[in-house]
Amino acid sequence: MTFLETDIFAKIVAGDIPCDKVFENERILAFRDIAPKAKHHILIIPKENYITAQEVTEENKALFGELFLVAKEIATDIHLTGYKLAMNVGETGGQIVPHVHLHLLSPDFKSEL
Ligand code: AMP
């Protein structure tokens, strides 16, 4: 698949598309992947519209880092002692949804993302 033209995750943040939410604060939203590749497959996103992780800067690095903090908190909440974190960056990096998202997968993940 190729990069989508529409930022569907911005629509989720806006409440225009429903999601199975697992975490939310002022800056971050996390929800279950619609096509899970593991028992637990959760996407952790900044609410702000960054397209890819190539947009990380000195100014916003705390926000990008918070994605990992939230991943740890969710993993702890659902009692995962080990898990996989992955982020596809750009179309040639396997990214489809044009909004930064960190994948959190339980160890039973089935395939590469
Ligand atoms: P990526 O290839 O890293 O861009 O992954 C995008 C992920 O978003 C895929 O695992 C999709 O299954 C997932 N996805 C697409 N649309 C939705 C949606 N509406 N709600 C939850 N997950 C979605």
Image (cartoon, rainbow, N blue to C red):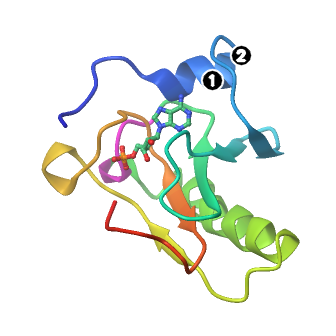
Residue furthest to the left:
92
Q: Looking at the image, which residue is at 36% across and 17% down?
A: 6
Residue furthest to the right:
77
Q: Nearer the viewer, residue 36 or 67?
A: 36
Confirm or reject: label 1 Cβ below 8 Å from ligand 1. Answer: yes
Q: Looking at the image, which residue is at 18% across and 34% down?
A: 2
What percent of the width, then of the height, locates residue 35?
A: 49, 44
User: Can residue 52 be found in the magenta stretch?
Assistant: yes
Are the residues at dot 2 and dot 1 in contact (C-beta closer than 8 Å)?
Answer: yes
- On screen, 85 above or below 1? below
Q: Which residue is mark 2?
A: 15
* Element marked by disc 1: helix
Q: Amino acid at mark 2?
A: Gly
What percent of the width, then of the height, locates residue 87?
A: 40, 60
Q: Looking at the image, which residue is at 66% across and 61% down?
A: 66
* Element marked by disc 2: loop
Quadrant the N terminus occupies: top left
- On screen, 42 above or below 109? above
Q: Main secondary structure of the magenta part?
A: loop
Based on the displayed image, in which of its 4 quarters is residue 14 positioned? top right
What percent of the width, then of the height, locates residue 50?
A: 44, 36
Q: Nearer the viewer, residue 36 or 83?
A: 36
Q: Looking at the image, which residue is at 53% across and 52% down?
A: 36
- Identify the magenta region: 50-54
Q: Kindly identify which numbered label has been placed on residue 43.
A: none
- Ligand 1 located in image quadrant: top left
- On screen, 22 above or below 68? above
Q: Amino acid at mark 1?
A: Ile
What percent of the width, then of the height, locates residue 107?
A: 56, 80
Q: Kindly identify which numbered label has been placed on residue 12.
A: 1
Measure the C-alpha gap from mark 2 to mark 1: 5 Å
Within 10 angstroms of label 1, few (less than 14), some, or many (20 or more) residues?
some
